[in-house]
Image: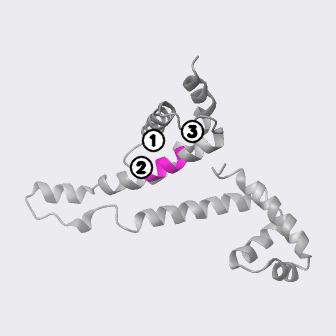
Amino acid sequence: MDAYDKLLKRLTPKLKGITYKLNSYLSCADHDDLFQEALLHLWLEFNSGKLVDKTDSYILQGCYFYLRNHIRKAGDKICPLSLDFVLAGEKGEELQPGLYLKDGTAENFRDELNDKLLADTIMNNGLTEREKKLLPFLAEGLTLREIGENLGISHVMVIKMTKVIREKCRKHTDRF
């Protein structure tokens, strides 16, 4: 087994996880398409010698950013159409861009929805009541001392709780 095959064997499970997560950003393709794109990227990077002495985490982050950029570029070229749009075209009427399913806010909406779903998942899977009370204060941008005063605990305890929350959040995100 050569070095590239060993690399793929190690990275494939996490790479598939990344493609499943990113698949929600590109409705015209599925995770297998993204996975193939990631494999092609890895092959080119490997052959050019850019992956020598790189950690798996570094390589996976590179794939993640490459795929996000690929989706951003492809999203501009691929635009699913509504049935009304197709029918209007068949009748010879002038096609109106307002009939597109995808508009400028769709990607932002999808990102926002994914963030809300992730936050809900994290809130309901493993956070203690005390940690749940801490999160809104962090979101407001309060200082550690202000949060401690609001919760009736020391700022040192706020730091410790924040670290615990971050560790719990890492289980639900794809950050490496």
Q: Quadrant of the rendered structure where residue 116 is? A: bottom right
Query: Relative to 109, is 11 on the left or the right?
Result: right
Marks 3/2 in contact by CB < 8 Å: the verdict is no
At label 2, which amino acid type do we have?
A: His
- Say few, some or many: other residues with alpha carbon within 10 Å of mark 1 (under 14 / 14 to 19 / 20 or more): many
Q: Which residues are magenta?
A: 63-69
Q: Nearer the viewer, residue 135 or 155?
A: 155
At horizontal 69% and vertical 74% (from top left) the residue drawn is 139
Q: How many marks?
A: 3
At horizontal 78% and vertical 80% (from top left) the residue drawn is 143
Q: Which residue is mark 2?
A: 70
Query: Relative to 150, is 22 on the left or the right?
Result: left
Q: Secondary structure at mark 3?
A: helix
Q: Main secondary structure of the magenta part?
A: helix
Q: Secondary structure at mark 1?
A: helix
Residue 56 higher or lower than 175, as above or below: above
Q: Farthest left residue?
A: 92
